[in-house]
Amino acid sequence: MADILEVEITSLGAQGDGVGDADGTPVFVPFTMPGDIVKAAVKDKRRNGLYTELLDVISPSVQRQEPPCQHFGACGGCQLQFMNDAVYSSWVRERASMALAHHGFTDVPVLDPAISPRASRRRVSLKALKTVSGVVLGFNERQSHKVVNLKACPVTRAELTSLFDPLRKVLGATLAQAMAANVHMTLTATGVDMMIDAPMSLDLAARERLVEFVNAHDIASLHWQEQGFLDPVAIRREPVMDFGGVHVPLPPAAFIQATDEGEAALAGAVVAACEGYGRVADLFSGIGTFTFPLARGHQVMAAEGAKSALDALKAGVSTATGLRQVITRHRDLFRQPISAAELDKIDAVVFDPPRAGAAAQVAEIAKSTVKRVVAVSCNPNTFSRDARTLVDGGYTLDSVLPVDQFLWSPHLELVGVFTRV
Ligand SMILES: C[S@@+](CC[C@H](N)C(=O)[O-])C[C@H]1O[C@@H](n2cnc3c(N)ncnc32)[C@H](O)[C@@H]1O
């Protein structure tokens, strides 16, 4: 087989690569879409097809658009921004359908996707590297450890991108030559919560410089982390998440949804699916993204494995008004899932596990008498596997809502609604 191919792209794969065909073998070409005719160099021959590098778009699809980001191509994020909105949106839906079909769900209604807009990402993790010509700050280049020095990031909130240049300056004065650091930023209801992870401790001058930076940019809090040791450099305001008026302190490294819009779409779907059901269990509750909106109308049992997240949730409960009863369970739900017998007192279960899914917990739900189950997942493959267990246990999968919080990337969240028949 020739190592340089001319291919017509006819579909999109699950990871967002365009897919064509060479003598009956699938050919995957990054940065391409259906309608393109391209020239590509074969890089890797795998069991499922040929993986290539794009050399040239000979004839572009009419549905291409000018990529909005100046770093497109070099930066490892947002590889699908050359598709127009209509094509991207239909691909998001198709991606959900493909994962479901892989597990035999071919006739489940997949709803219109909720896609977060540009400039909505409220949490970013950046790499920083001090070089002779200043600090390089940004995301990794595609398939590389090199860092793209970001001038702009069209998917991220302006409150975070406006800190890129000031960060370069303060890190330039603080890091040693050739030193690398990671910068984690989250936009909370009280301002930016920042953690800088670097292999050095701070002397007095560095500490004062960082405090000045924090004050100048009205940053809520800054921690410096060295070898796992968290140094609270400046805590001007406690970082807090606002879940419909309930204020929850955000512990370092606790999970939150990536955009306000994504959180609203997920929570809205969860609350709507639980309407009319009495007691609800919110499993893998985190700091209470779904617990609090649910607790406006239901008694809720929130179960979570991270103690700091559950403590934050309890702190939110203690200051909130207008909630029904919230009880909490600190549990490793992989090793000790809430049992079918415990679940029989519950009317609806919401579960939102990490990428690995919730196999052990779902096996218990499948044996229970719970009438309504809502699965929220950041992994369409483990979602479909867990959905199969529920359906084999007597549930129907009524609908699936795709929620995309990582615009122009293949990451996708799903909300599946199940009913016991
Ligand atoms: C995808 S997050 C969802 C959190 C929350 N539902 C939200 O939307 O913010 C998954 C949560 O599962 C928790 N988790 C991970 N492994 C767990 C386990 N074995 N047992 C219980 N909780 C676990 C994490 O701490 C995290 O809070």
Image (spheres, rainbow, N blue to C red):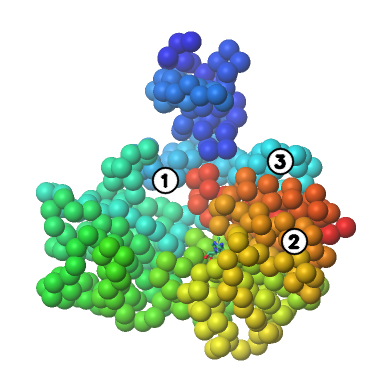
Return the residue at label 1. Answer: 77
- Using the rendered view, name the quadrant where residue 48 is placed: top right
Q: Residue at x 68, y 80 (%)?
A: 296
Return the residue at label 2. Answer: 365
Q: Residue at x 57, y 74 (%)?
A: 330
Return the residue at label 3. Answer: 103
Would residue 341 be found to the left or right of residue 11 on screen?
right
Closer-to-camera residue (343/74): 343
As helix, strand or loop, the secondary structure at mark 1 comes to loop
Q: Whole-Å distance between the Cαs marked 2 and 3? A: 19 Å
Q: Which of marks 2 and 3 is nearer the N terminus?
A: 3
Q: Which amino acid does label 1 sit on?
A: Gly
Closer-to-camera residue (82/298): 298
Local packing at callout 2 (Cα closer than 10 Å; few below 14, some 14-19, many 20+) is: many
- Using the rendered view, name the quadrant where residue 366 is placed: bottom right
* Image position, residue 170 (x, y; %): 19, 64
Q: Looking at the rendered structure, which numbered label has been put on residue 17?
A: none
Q: Whole-Å distance between the Cαs marked 1 and 3? A: 28 Å
Local packing at callout 3 (Cα closer than 10 Å; few below 14, some 14-19, many 20+) is: some
Q: Is residue 97 above or below residue 201?
A: above
Closer-to-camera residue (392/71): 392
CB under 8 Å between callouts 2 and 3? no
From the image, which quarter does the C terminus lie in?
bottom right
Q: Which of marks 1 and 3 is nearer the N terminus?
A: 1
Would residue 202 be found to the left or right of residue 141 on screen?
left
Query: Quick check: can you spot residue 35?
Result: no
Closer-to-camera residue (199/361): 361
* Image position, residue 115 (x, y; %): 57, 53
Query: Quick check: can you spot residue 139?
Result: yes
Q: Which of marks 2 and 1 is nearer the N terminus?
A: 1
Q: Residue at x 46, y 68 (%)?
A: 254
Q: What residue type is labelled 3?
A: His
